[in-house]
Amino acid sequence: MSKQRKEKILIVDDEENIRKSLRMIFEYDGYAILEAADGEEALKIIEETVGLDLVLLDIKLPGLDGMEVLAELRKRPYFPEVIMISGHGTVHTAVEATKLGAFDFFEKPLHRERVLLSVRNALSQNRLARECSDLRQKTEKKYRLIGNHPSMKTLWEQIQKIAPTNATIMIYGESGTGKELIARAVHAQSLRSKDAFVQVNCAAIPEELIESELFGHVKGAFTGATEKKPGKFELADHGTIFLDEIGDMSLKTQAKVLRVLEEGEVQKVGSGRIDHVDVRIIAATNKDLKIEIENGNFREDLYFRLNVVPLHSPALRDKQEDIPLLIDYFSSNFAEENNFRAKAFTPAAREAMTKFYWKGNVRELKNVVERLLIMTGSETIDKQDLPEQLKSDADIVLPDVGKVENLKEFRDLAEKKFILAKLEENDWNISQTARQIDTPRSNLYKKLEQYGIKIKAGVGEVVAPSSPEKEEGGEESPNSTGQDGR
């Protein structure tokens, strides 16, 4: 069992007796002590010491005085807690020290119990600040946007422009593409970054509870409301609220969200009181809201208020060159978070994963990477370790998006390549191929005819018949040989 780290305290005073007496007090309490007799020496020690927790700093020093040292420390992004000491203290000096970031201010002669109490409180605050900093760094790493594809670079440029404003944002994209990451990136780059980021999945909350979740409720508002509860908008005051899958929100709730957007007003369920909030709204959906409006499922006025700045989260298949980066990122994160030994992916495994059509996008890729890290026994992950679907689909190359003019053309080309690859994989056995791709044989024959795919026969090739008929024995036959597509 490792010993607990001793917290480090630097005593800066030109009087050796004071340094000596303070050292005895603090070492008895288990602290590690460093000493400096002037400001220049103090700054050098602070620069060279890793993990310094607290500085006791005399104001009157030869050369740089204590206030100048404190001002110099403040210029640094991270500095230890500071307690100022003075033999000629005034209220004005104490106030100035506090403005510069000092935790406390003592006048000489020092009183042991008061000094120890203040030191303990300062170190407690320092530990809390370090923990918050570590947590923030872990959170930023966990929710980082990864990618070098042009679409990701464009997205990041848009985020940089939008983030410092208060503009409402609508993020469009398929499920699993990382819409939440975009919302968090906007919040992190905004002027609201030090306040709350509150996420609400509108599709996951039952309709009868979503108003209570968003706007809160008072005690007795409904059965089970045993106490007052703040809503998500209230919790996000001065920060950002992310309304994920807003296309699934009921029309009644949409009207209340519109009220927040227009007036900044929220009303708890069961209350007649109107409260005001200052919240930036970022919404996201995987639906086409224009179609939802036409079908009467989404308010047009809310759409226009939310769609001030639209952002698009690209599907993983549209940025395949980023897949190796994401594999490394997810592997590293999982190993770090779970104290897990890192494993390497071979070039063959990476190639197969890069070519795969990730229907579940980045979320699916992340899940597969983590599963492979856990379940693969060797230190390297090869193509043979991949799930069967990845291995079998690895050789299916999608059409180049730059060479197709519309969605139908892309879909047809992709479907044709998929069918050809599966036929090759199954030695052109029609029944077996149909079973594997989960479609009726009659439908597969239609697709073969549609795309002009010829069935490989024993001698030569014949075009698939448009209306396959069952032979005796109940088997559909593509040609006169009676063989099943061979």
Image: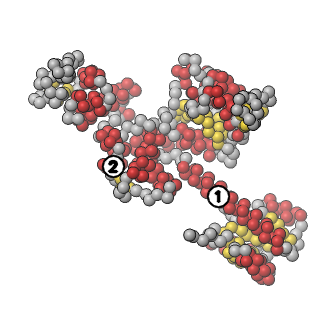
Picture quadrant where residue 195 is located: top right
Residue drawn at 79 percent across, 73 percent down? 58
CA–CA distance in space, label 2 to label 1: 39 Å
Front in this rendered view, residue 435 or 57: 435
Res 47 label: none
Q: 185 left or right of 259?
A: left
The local crowd at label 2, few if under 14, some if 14 to 19, many if 20 or more residues have their Cα within 10 Å, is: some
Of the two numbered discs 2 and 1 on the same chain, state the one appearing first in sequence. Answer: 1
Q: x and y percent of residue 375 in the render?
A: 39, 51
Dot 1 corresponds to which residue? 131
Residue drawn at 44 percent across, 49 percent down? 370
Residue drawn at 47 percent across, 56 percent down? 335
* Quarter of the image that includes the C terminus: top left
Q: Tag 1: residue type?
A: Glu
Residue drawn at 62 percent across, 72 percent down? 48
Q: x and y percent of residue 22 in the render?
A: 77, 77
Q: x and y percent of residue 312 in the render?
A: 52, 34
Q: Tag 2: residue type?
A: Asp
The answer to whether any part of residue 309 appears in the image is no
Q: 411 left or right of 8?
A: left
Dot 2 corresponds to which residue? 385
Picture quadrant where residue 261 is located: top right
* Quarter of the image that includes the N terminus: bottom right
